[in-house]
Image (cartoon, grey):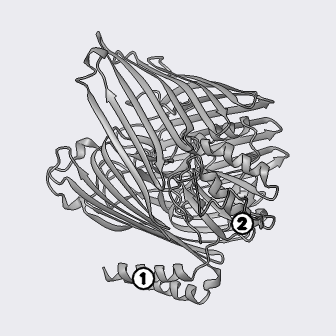
């Protein structure tokens, strides 16, 4: 810690003398949470303080998070008693970098992707509140030729304080006008359940062709897993193809995927469907799946835009199948905006004799009432399930209104869960209200009260991912 | 605790001394070619808007940004998508099918976004032709574009229209979430 502090002080002292070339910005977010669900703690406090420094070609950044204690996104992980392990006060992000011309070096917490993320992706998953970023050394050369080399570690999923390793490189070069070819090689060393390291090597090639109105992408990857505990070596493969063509007001596109034993932690496979749905809710993507996607869009008289997107996927045995449909019409009328869409997702598993279908229309409108903007969002989801001979269905309606009164932004929402229409009055409702107010020039206060199901929410003109919640939240956000 | 307090004081002191300039960047465009900040500077004000395909308010903002682009010849509008690589196709298709004249860049690793503390889209910056940040704003509601226009006119040296002076009056733009005049 002393070394870290000394480095920090030395760096800042140097920067002070050259402050004309210094860039600095940061954010502090303090959040107080009171949960009304059964939980012995009820109250949580979190503070996140992050800053970034830039000086000539150097950059440096840190984020300090304190969770007192850490608030879990999982209902099953509610704390019965105060757990000392949940109290955390630490620098959770730390990096330093140097860039000059086409070269750059980055050391520390790293987000990086090779190609589309099939062979390697180190990233923070905000949707599921998971951090898959490596602590690494990354070297980049990015000019006509693009080259990346990385060596890093990430904490093991099986052992706290021990690490998985990842290392490899990626190269891409424009061989002719519009055509770029690339290749990646990665090695993964993963710590297994019994303290044994298993190995996986991944090799991938890709071609990207862009010419006029045509965009195409193709990637093919192979992997070999060995030194596995309790099982034989295995080979995996991945194929992903995508093409889009724009012809005046009409656009058409198609994608194809085939993944076989190609699932590992540091990757982010393209799923080739509109809603980014997995083939099965119970299995990780990439184990065994194949599928295609077709999409089209048409702009009508500049005021309307129609789009359609359909995809199917299945496994080799045909026991698992899914389809995904999205239809939408966007309309612009002066400053007003209307969007009506239809979503449909269906999944079948013949082995467990389960079937699930959900479909929902969504309406988003944004217009002015007496000169003040009002945004209304409505969704009505129907979910039907079958397991063996047992069938069930329910409805999940949602309504939200966003508007402003002077500098105060307000969002009122309610969602529910209806078994059937006769039980509407007795059903569970989740009302909520969020108010946002700029207290000072750089400081916002946000208050939330109520219940919400979690996931991606767009309120008061901002989109973010949130955990399922019931209670009160107060957040003070300051930028400098 | 002493370390934290000391660090905080140092950073805050530095932030008072530091310039509010946009960090230089090199990000790929639709065709996969790198575009740097340096190549965009020098001709007039620039609106840099961080967006994502899943962000409805971002999409609501686009026609307004296009309108500003058409109104002010020296203005550039740079849209930076923070979508994950697997969602980039959707973001590209959305922009291409709507014939916007924006400069569209992609920052899937959030390398620039994290340096500017951009976490929740939309997050918009207005910079002058030297690259200094004159305004930033989180969120978008119709009416916010009038605030943007106020800053753009100021940077272009255009005198206020009688009904304007949005920064002071802000009739229908009451809902902006953050106003950072630096």
Quadrant occupied by the N terminus of chain A: bottom left
Residue at image position (53%, 58%) is: B118
Give the residue at mark 1: B9
Give the residue at mark 2: B154
Q: Position of residue A286 (x, y in %)?
A: 49, 34
Q: Is residue B22 visible?
A: no
Residue at image position (38%, 21%) is: A383
Mark 2 lies on a secondary structure that is: helix
- In front of the other: B181 or A146: B181
Q: Position of residue A10 (x, y in %)?
A: 50, 87
- Residue at the far top: name it: A389
- Residue at the far front: name it: B162
Q: Establish if A9 lies above or below B38.
A: below
In screen coordinates, is A53 left or right of B151? left
Query: Which mark's residue is nearer the viewer, 2 or 1?
Result: 2
- In front of the other: B69 or A136: B69
Q: How many marks?
A: 2
Question: Subunit of mark 2?
Answer: B
Mark 1 lies on a secondary structure that is: helix
Q: Establish if A263 lies above or below A186.
A: above
Q: Position of residue A252 (x, y in %)?
A: 72, 27
Q: Is residue A363 visible?
A: yes
Question: Subunit of mark 1?
Answer: B
In screen coordinates, is A160 left or right of A62? left
Residue at image position (62%, 61%) is: B125
Q: Position of residue A271 (x, y in %)?
A: 54, 33
């Amino acid at each position: 810690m002393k070394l870290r502090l000394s480095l920090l002080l030395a760096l800042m002292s140097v920067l002070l003398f050259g402050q004309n070339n210094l860039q600095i910005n940061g954010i502090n977010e303090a959040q107080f949470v009171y949960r009304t669900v059964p939980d012995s703690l009820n109250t949580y406090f979190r503070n996140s303080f992050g800053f970034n420094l830039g000086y000539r070609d150097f950059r440096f950044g840190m984020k300090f998070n304190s969770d007192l204690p850490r608030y879990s996104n999982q209902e099953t992980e509610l704390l019965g008693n105060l757990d000392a392990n949940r109290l955390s006060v630490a620098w959770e992000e730390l990096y330093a970098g140097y860039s000059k011309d086409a070269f750059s070096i980055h050391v520390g917490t790293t987000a990086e992707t090779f190609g589309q993320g099939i062979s390697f992706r180190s990233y923070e998953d905000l949707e599921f509140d998971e951090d898959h970023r490596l602590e690494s050394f990354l070297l980049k050369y990015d000019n006509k030729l693009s080259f990346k080399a990385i060596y890093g570690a990430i904490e093991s999923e099986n052992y706290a304080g021990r690490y998985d390793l990842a290392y490899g490189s990626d190269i891409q070069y424009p061989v002719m006008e519009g055509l770029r070819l690339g290749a990646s090689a990665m090695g993964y060393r993963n710590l297994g359940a019994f303290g044994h390291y298993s190995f996986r090597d991944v090799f991938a090639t890709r071609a990207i062709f862009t010419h006029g109105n045509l965009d195409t992408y193709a990637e093919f990857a192979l992997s070999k897993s060995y030194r596995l505990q309790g099982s034989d070596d295995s080979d995996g493969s991945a194929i992903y193809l995508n093409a889009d063509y724009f012809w005046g007001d009409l656009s058409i596109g198609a994608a194809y995927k085939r993944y076989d034993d190609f699932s590992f932690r540091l990757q982010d496979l393209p799923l080739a469907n509109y809603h980014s749905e997995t083939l099965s809710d119970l299995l990780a993507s990439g184990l065994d799946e194949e599928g295609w996607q077709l999409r089209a869009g048409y702009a009508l008289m500049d005021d309307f835009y129609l789009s359609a997107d359909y995809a199917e996927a299945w496994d080799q045995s045909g026991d698992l199948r899914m389809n995904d449909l999205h239809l939408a019409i966007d309309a612009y009328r002066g400053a007003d905006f209307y969007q009506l869409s239809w979503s449909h997702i269906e999944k079948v598993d013949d082995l467990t004799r389960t079937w699930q279908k959900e479909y929902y229309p969504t309406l988003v409108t944004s217009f002015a009432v007496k000169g003040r903007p009002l945004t209304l969002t409505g969704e009505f989801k129907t979910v039907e399930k079958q397991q063996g001979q047992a069938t069930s269905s329910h409805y999940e309606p949602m309504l939200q209104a966003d508007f402003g009164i002077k500098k105060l932004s307000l969002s009122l929402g309610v969602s529910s869960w209806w078994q059937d229409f006769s039980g509407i009055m007795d059903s569970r409702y989740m009302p909520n209200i969020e108010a946002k107010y700029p207290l000072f020039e750089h400081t916002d206060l946000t208050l939330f009260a109520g219940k919400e199901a979690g996931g991606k929410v767009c309120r008061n003109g901002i989109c973010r991912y949130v955990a399922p919640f019931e209670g009160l939240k107060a957040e003070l956000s300051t930028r400098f | 605790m002493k370390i934290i307090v000391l660090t905080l004081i140092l950073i805050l002191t530095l932030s008072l001394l530091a310039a509010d300039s946009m960090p230089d960047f090199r990000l790929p465009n639709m065709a996969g070619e790198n575009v740097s900040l340096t190549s965009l500077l020098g001709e007039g004000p620039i609106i840099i808007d961080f967006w994502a395909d899943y962000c409805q308010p971002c999409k609501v903002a686009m026609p307004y940004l296009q309108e500003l682009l058409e109104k002010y010849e020296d203005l550039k509008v740079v849209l930076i998508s923070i979508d994950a690589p697997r969602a980039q196709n959707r973001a590209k298709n959305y922009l291409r099918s709507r014939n916007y004249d924006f400069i569209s860049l992609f920052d899937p690793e959030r390398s620039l976004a994290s340096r500017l503390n951009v976490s929740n889209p939309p997050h918009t910056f207005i910079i002058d032709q030297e690259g200094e940040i004159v305004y930033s704003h989180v969120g978008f509601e119709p009416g916010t574009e009038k605030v943007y226009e106020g800053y753009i006119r100021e940077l272009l040296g255009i005198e206020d229209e009688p009904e304007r002076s949005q920064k002071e009056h802000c009739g229908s733009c009451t809902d902006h979430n953050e106003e950072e005049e630096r």
